[in-house]
Amino acid sequence: MCGIVGYVGPQQAQGVVIDGLRRLEYRGYDSAGVALVVQGGTVVTAKKAGKLANLEKVLADSPLPASTTGIGHTRWATHGPPTDVNAHPHDGNAHRIALVHNGIIENFADLRARLEADDHVLVSQTDTEVVAHLVELQVQSGEDLTTAMQRVCQQLEGAFTLVAVDSQDPDRVVAARRNSPLVVGVGEGEYFVGSDVAAFISHTREALELGQDQVVTITRDGVEITDFDGRPAQGRRFHVDWDLSAAEKDGHDWFMRKEIFEQPRAVADSLLGRRTRAGLLQLDEMRLSDDEIRDVDKIIIIACGTSFYAGMVAKYAIEHWTRVPVEVELASEFRYRDPILDYSTLIVAISQSGETADTLQAIRHARTQRSKVLAICNTNGSTIPRESDAVIYTHAGPEIGVASTKGFLTQLVACYLLALYVAQVKGTRYGDEINQVMGQLEAMPDHIETVLSASESVYALAREHLDTRSVLFLGRHAGYPVALEGALKLKELAYLHAEGFAAGELKHGPIALIEEGLPVLCVVPPRGRDQLHEKMLSGIQEVRARGARTICLAEEGDTRIEPYADVLIRLPQVPTLLQPLVAIVPLQLFACELASALGHDVDQPRNLAKSVTVE
Ligand code: M6R
């Protein structure tokens, strides 16, 4: 996710800002920029696609004037590819202000249309530039930058952190936040704003936490906080005692753990802006026409690893809501079986990185057979979406841990959205049914939060298994891919023998593996659907009768499971199709903690690469 820094004080702002951006590099980014306010009434900007080194080269070739007020940004592309023009900061047509942004402005298309109707010329494809124009309009009408920011924030929908400077007010930096991170650093006669404390920790360890929907103004004299209506507000003062590397991980020991805890936010972000005011589902980036979707009579999902398991869950959802048959295929196998494809087959390629070679080769093959390809991807500007006919971006933010966590959850969200969208276009579900599921999806971040709040008990359970050499995972229906993904997490992180099975298949062979004390993690489906729950209970009894130690993930209120569970982990009550979004979380925590307790490198497990760019 984007990194943001703002500074006002006695030091040269350029050095402070670049230093802050460097410390935010771990967040992942694809372009960078700075803006400085120069005494005498101008704002100067430098920005460049690529790594910070590219920006530094620009600054070395064409040095900016001295300045003690500045802002900086590392951009992780969402709206528009990573180019020089789309890099932040952005300004308005009068070039009076400069503004950087993290998040997504949901109503930017409406706002942009209004600006263009008033003869504003917007040069980038970003949602951010729209906000820069709006803030500039306000300051040109005579408001100070703080009031301008308050007024503009009232017009914005979505999640955002904004930071701006005004050439006519050289000692002021103004920032705002809604559902997106922003902290203030409090120094001696100098103040900072940042996406997190890593942005300023080398200058001060005193910080202020802001509340929701607040605007903060920093000057050399201090900090002033208000709400979006201009009413005074308070921040919470705290002292940062983390070392620098812990600060980058938000206090967690591993990026993976941090990313597990980011999942409620990532899921919420992936759902932002998907419904029109009229209640219809919209997928902005998806470039397939309704006619093309109506023509689809078969969907083939291709992916690898965790993304493949997301595809397996998607099959249940797509077939249930759309009645279109779905096949799910490992990308590495796809083209070698000479698949039967034509223009009415939609290929859905799921890839967090957008660079996986197996998946890329598979979509290239599909396109030679005239099939349309839709990518579900977390990385804007990557190869797979670029070579696809359509794309749905997930908004997980950069995933640094090699083991995919928030990438998986946001892929599930994108798959649900795709399924509902196809159902809407094909008319296989009524609008109120689609809205009901959207409401259930929008409640998922809170449910995931509930699961995370019980993390300590899962950690304790993981630490009981330090001597375990083998673990089995059972699931049925949408819980089966969760079992497979739970096993994959344990294999790749803890280097254990771990296998996932469809619970009904057990008696056809794998039950021979059960021996006294073998841990078996069971994903129990919600009650009351197609006898799934009852059948799962039978499977659990079968392994328990043969000595297995059953660790059951079951919904609140499920008392039937109690006699058969040696350990019970409770899940919130959610519909069967959406249960993977909560059921996988304890399995991620389990694998992360067990690997950590075993002394393994959780973020970079042996033999693995984050992005597998060879076949
Ligand atoms: O970037 P992709 O989603 O295409 O990556 C696919 C797999 O390589 C990836 O999911 C891998 O299995 C992860 N290590 C799982 O944690």
Image (tube, rainbow, N blue to C red):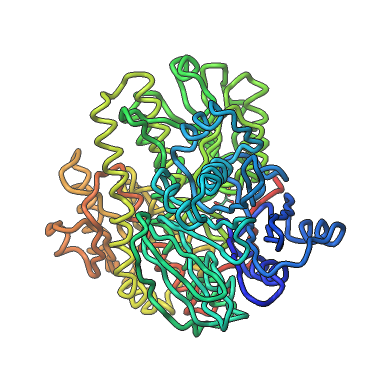
Q: Give the image location of residue 395, x and y in percent.
A: 49, 48
- Note whether 486 is above or below 518 in the view shown: above
- Note whether 40 is above or below 324 in the view shown: below
Q: Give the image location of residue 265, x and y in percent.
A: 41, 55
Q: Quadrant of residue 356?
A: top right
Instruction: Work out whether residue 170 or residue 241 is closer to the camera in this orientation and state it.
Output: 170
Instruction: Work out whether residue 237 or residue 57 is closer to the camera in this orientation and state it.
Output: 237
Going by the image, does 331 lie left or right of 66? left
Is residue 373 visible in the rendered image? The answer is: yes
Going by the image, does 89 lie left or right of 598? right
Q: Quadrant of the C terminus?
A: top right
Q: Give the image location of residue 370, x and y in percent.
A: 62, 18
Question: Residue at horizontal 54%, vertical 40%?
Answer: 130
Is residue 513 visible in the rendered image? The answer is: no
Instruction: Work out whether residue 150 or residue 414 is closer to the camera in this orientation and state it.
Output: 150
Q: Give the image location of residue 485, x and y in percent.
A: 44, 54
Give the tally of numbered discs: 0
Question: Residue at horizontal 65%, vertical 64%?
Answer: 70
